[in-house]
Image: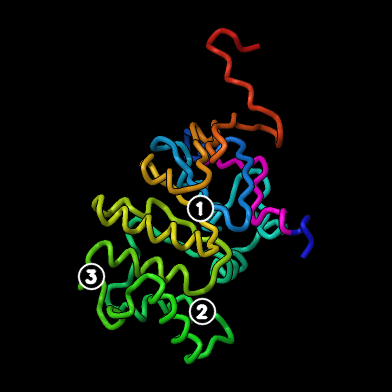
Amino acid sequence: MTKAETNRPLIRLEGLKKVFYTDEVETHALAGVHLDINQGDYVAIAGPSGCGKSTLLSIVGLLDSPTEGAYLLHEKPVQQLKASQRARIRNLEIGFIFQSFNLIGDLTVYENVELPLTYRKGVGRTERKQRVMQSLDRVAMTHRAKHYPSQLSGGQQQRVAVARALVGAPSILLADEPTGNLDSKNGEAVMDLMRELHQGGATICMVTHDPRFARYAERTIHLFDGRIVEEETGNGIETARGERGKPIAPEPAPGERS
């Protein structure tokens, strides 16, 4: 692989817009987002409630489609794919970690982690078992493989959810407020686990409202009213960009619009 190829972004968003329509109202959830996520990045998306964080993550996770703009995954446009095509890519490329864990109560820990692999062609029972146990080992939950979610603490349930997200060896982990249902001690434990996964090579994009947890990431993207208004990196704060490479002009004050 050439140096140019390694510098190509895993995910590229160009002019991404999302509008929700009702009978009388248009809600602009995203208003022109440009963002690159490279292999091995750890990106936090922060901002106030209603700023578009979860909408952006849903589009990146192919759970929703943008109204306008381009989404390139591995340099291939995916924003207009059919639902069945998006589902296949989600299964192969994307691991999800949700605030509410989303474990199935009548399945054991092992069966919950195994579930994504049951939808993959060509993955036999022996390979599934090997992958599940490796995933559980990475989150220190092999000893709970035969337990049910109701027998676990919140922190343990989230560890199982992380194992389920990892089991398919996805290109990127998407975490939507992964500490939102946890106390501070368990929240920090989950964030430490995600940092270990990143240090091991995982690419992570996480939505969080908590500045403490955003600091675990290498880059923090600040959203406001559906726009990226600021990006923090290890090198400091950068102004947001509109068209790729051009600073966003500030909104004119009332009475100053041309």
Residue at 33%, 53% in the rendered image: 179
Which numbered tag is attached to residue 152?
3
Residue 26 visible in the current orientation: no
Q: Residues within 10 Å of mark 1 (few under 14, many from 20)?
A: many
The residue that disc 1 covers is 205
Question: Residue 15 colored magenta?
Answer: yes
Hey, what amino acid is under mark 1?
Answer: Cys
Q: Is residue 246 left or right of residue 185?
A: right
Quarter of the image where the C terminus is located: top right
Q: Please give left or right for residue 237 compared with residue 149 in the image.
A: right
Whether residue 113 is visible, yes or no, is yes
Q: Which quadrant of the view contains residue 79? A: bottom right
In the picture of the structure, the residue carrying the numbered disc 2 is 119
Image coordinates of residue 54 in percent, x first then y, are 45, 47
Q: State which region is magenta.
A: 6-20
The residue lying furthest to the top in this view is 255
What's under tag 2, amino acid-wise? Tyr
Residue 144's quadrant in the figure? bottom left
Classify mark 3: helix, strand or loop. loop
Nearer the observer, disc 1 or disc 2?
1
Q: Magenta span has 169?
A: no
Residue at figure coordinates x 47%, y 81% from the top left: 131
> Please, what is the three-letter code of the amino acid marked with disc 3?
Leu
Q: Position of residue 96 (x, y in %)?
A: 46, 62
Q: Residue furthest left?
A: 151
Query: Viewer-nearest of labels 3 and 2?
Result: 3
Badge 1 marks a residue whose secondary structure is: strand
Q: Secondary structure at mark 2?
A: loop
Q: How is the image coloured?
A: rainbow
